[in-house]
Image: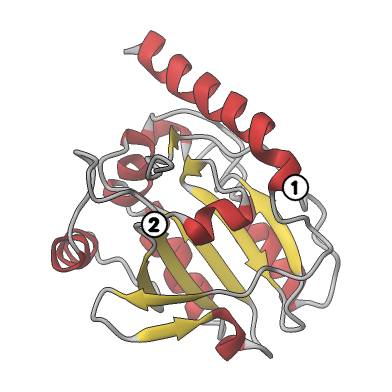
Amino acid sequence: MKMLRRTLIATAAALFAAGSAHAATVGQPAPDFTLKDATGKTVRLSDFKGKHVVLEWTNPGCPFVRKHYDSGNMPATQKDATGKGVVWLAINSTEKASSDYLEPAKLVAWKAERKSAPSAILMDEEGTVGKSYGARTTPHMYIVNPQGQLVYAGGIDSIPSARPADIEKATNYVKVGLAEALAGKPISAATTQPYGCSIKYKSPA
């Protein structure tokens, strides 16, 4: 299991490094996008100009995602953020052909069982939005400021493991970054290394 975890993390890190040249850049405008949410409603990032927005790449089939949901850490981080007026968009870029893919209703049910509280769950089965951000792992986290600038990109926290016991010891980069951003301060760790499973993107035709 340890070897599997290391392989997943190493693979994700290699993919991130390989794709970082095309990734959205902290300090630059966040790529705008339009996606359908899990209920079929159209959601645009630009609709939330004037608010802080968190983007969370997710896939319930990933043990790193389950670590943060089954422990309650991701739902608690979401609720802390949305309670302060932050918009939280969970994005699933898993392709339909993947064994990890959950259709929208099942994805909503999985998150509801864990008392998840994003502002919306967005479907990106074609992977267009994920690739425009350079998202490589689940989870992979981003913060967009009210002016539409990307101000954080990286991991949910500082300990890259699938062990729930590590959560209490880790620095929650999203929580800290949001607190700094909401206080009008620059984010002290604006770019960190994401960790998790590689995103199951649709292969090019």
- In the shown orientation, is residue 126 left or right of residue 31? left
The disc label shown at residue 191, or none: 1
Q: Is residue 9 above or below residue 197?
A: above
Nearer to the camera, 157 or 168: 157
The disc labelled 1 sits on which kind of residue? Thr
Residue corresponding to mark 2:
126
Q: Quadrant of the N terminus?
A: top left
Label 1 vs label 2, nearer the camera? 2
The disc label shown at residue 71, or none: none
Q: Is residue 3 above or below residue 71?
A: above
- Cα separation, mark 1 vs mark 2, equals 26 Å
Q: Position of residue 174 (x, y in %)?
A: 61, 57
Q: Secondary structure at mark 2?
A: loop
Q: 10 Å neighbourhood of mark 1: few (<14), some, or many (≥20)?
A: some
- Please identify the quarter of the rendering in which residue 98 is found: top left
Q: Position of residue 186 (x, y in %)?
A: 85, 65
Q: Earlier in the sequence, mark 1 or mark 2?
A: 2
Q: Secondary structure at mark 1?
A: loop
Q: Position of residue 37 (x, y in %)?
A: 33, 76
- Tally of numbered tags: 2
The disc labelled 2 sits on which kind of residue? Glu
